[in-house]
Amino acid sequence: MEKEKIDVSPLHSSMKKKAAFTLAEVLITLGIIGVVAAMTIPVLLSQYKDMVAKQQFKRAYSVIQQAFQAVYADDGYIYGCYYWDKNPYPSSVCVEQNDAGICIKTEMPDGSPVPSNYTGEYTGCDDFTKALEKHLNIIKKCENNAFANGCIPKYTGIDTYFKEQDENLSDDMAEQKSSGCDGWTQNKLENECTAYVLSDGTIILLYRKNFRLFAIDINGMKGPNKWGHDLFAFGARGSINKPPYVATDLACNPTQEGGRSTYVMLLNAYK
């Protein structure tokens, strides 16, 4: 039987040699892959975290929105606990400012006192809050000392927030700048606000113990626990003829570095 002939021509030998990679070529390839990975993985992780945050925001927003609607559907009347959807009063005039340039006293254009319901109604807030509680799957409630009692993680109070923005700001000036939003100061956040923990871990934090103004931590105790990242401020808007609805365009809405305001987050979440 005739044996198979093996091609030992120079061309065949050269092709066999080039079929394998040299160590240098392998190292260069791995280096290129490493550079590409270093450039793309952080971007992909950032995009993934952003996507998760948007989904968590949408879920939390839907839960609170449905609770607002359920209260009106069940009771059939409008609780007086909201900021005006459209303010029926003319703009007030500032007549006194504090050292930080924040207005601390206003009056109406004709010089008369500002009405007690100038910003909205609040006389029905206690009843509205109790009604809303029935439509939220609450597993824990802290009426005082929310931080010490484990309802909330460590958040940045609005006074601390101002000091972070300006390291030269004194405690007194930070307090003055917080005027009008002092329900979010460090001490009141931790020791005076009412907080709820829902069954899915979401945290709802009330400003002055009612739902006229509140904040939601969309991922609960998990970090970063920062305003505009996973902690967002909301409020109730309405009128005599319009039931309160969840609003995102109110004041007292701090946004820490790299975060989004509640309104901007809402727009991005539903793109």
Image (cartoon, grey):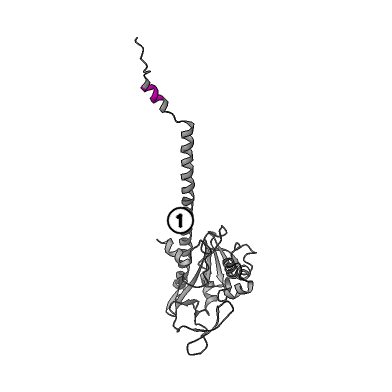
- Asked which quadrant contains residue 99, the reply is bottom right
- Residue at 49% from the left image edge and 46% from the top image edge: 38
Q: Can the viewer see residue 196?
A: yes
Please provide percent x and percent y for residue 176.
Answer: 59, 76
Q: Is residue 175 above or below residue 37?
A: below
57 vs 242, nearest the viewer: 57
153 vs 82, nearest the viewer: 153
User: Is 15 inside the magenta-drawn segment?
Assistant: yes
Tell me the SS state at disc 1: helix
146 vs 104, nearest the viewer: 104
| Quarter the C terminus occupies | bottom left
Please provide percent x and percent y for residue 131.
Answer: 51, 72
- The residue carrying pointer 1 sits among few (fewer than 14), some (14 to 19) or many (20 or more) residues within 10 Å by Cα, namely some
- Residue at 36% from the left image edge and 22% from the top image edge: 11
Q: Which residues are magenta?
A: 11-16
Residue type at numbered disc 1: Met
User: Where does label 1 land, which residue?
Assistant: 51
Please provide percent x and percent y for residue 181.
Answer: 56, 74
- Asked which quadrant contains residue 199, the reply is bottom right
